[in-house]
Amino acid sequence: MFDLDQFIADLRATLGERSRQAMKEVVARAVSDPVALMRRIGEPDKAALQVLLDAPDLTVLNVVWAPKQVTLPHDHRMSAVIGMYGGREDNLFWRRVANPEKFQIEAAGGQALGTGDVAILGRDVVHSVVNPLARISGAIHVYDGHFLAQQRSMWDAETLVEQPYDVHAVAKGMPLQTTGVGGKG
């Protein structure tokens, strides 16, 4: 059975180690039993960003992607671990290119994640996300900092020019849920 309090305690224990691999192992255990996980956090029925923990040292989100949803390129400015408990999340990675007048990006690779897969994203990664499926996909996203308060950037889909992050533009159609399972910690 998935225990959210123990999951968060295990994640916090990895912060002292400063090991993203240890954090990845904790997330991998959680997503290895999607049924137990969903019993605790709820079965996804619509796109949403559900806050499981919002603290200065650690943020844990339940990210539920709508069918065929696409996000704008964006950064986190902190490390992240993503664990899929249902469906798929395709990440397109971008790299910054030098331009004296604009801060632009260009495509630099990708990684497809399916149910049970876990990935580590470094603090400087810029990525966009696609749920290529015609059904909802769900993932646990863990950040080693205060993600919801962090100033970050996003890039215009057409010009690929950097601009200030706007959660409503990046996560279009995904309401932020801060009540219910977890919350501030």
Image: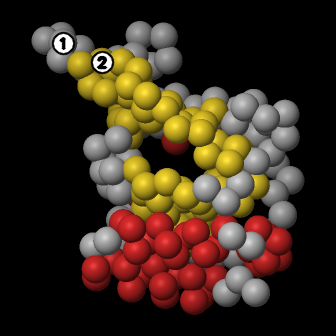
Instruction: From this view, report whether residue 39 is shown above or below residue 80.
Output: below
Image-quadrant location for residue 33: bottom right
The part of the image, by quadrant, that contains residue 22 is bottom left
Q: Can the viewer see residue 130?
A: yes
Where residue 131 sits in the image (x, y, percent)? 69, 36
Describe the element under mark 1 as helix, strand or loop. loop
> Closer to the camera, 179 or 147?
147
CB atoms at circles 2 and 1 under 8 Å apart?
A: yes
Q: Residues within 10 Å of mark 1 (few under 14, many from 20)?
A: few
Q: Does residue 179 appear in this view?
A: no
Residue 130 picture location, percent across and down: 63, 33
Residue type (three-letter) at the residue carrying disc 2: Gln
Residue 104 to residue 149: above or below: above
Q: Amino acid at mark 1?
A: Asn
Which residue sits at x=84%, y=33%?
134
Direction from residue 182 to residue 25 in the image, left or right: left
Find residue 73 and report its horizontal and vertical position in percent. Answer: 46, 30
Q: Considering the image in quadrants, where does the N terminus appear?
A: bottom right
Seen in the picture, residue 21 relative to 155 is either above or below; the reply is: below
Q: Mark 2 to mark 1: distance in Å?
A: 7 Å
- Of the residues under marks 2 and 1, which one precedes in the sequence? 1
Q: Is residue 90 rendered to the left or right of residue 159?
A: right
Q: Which residue is mark 2?
A: 104
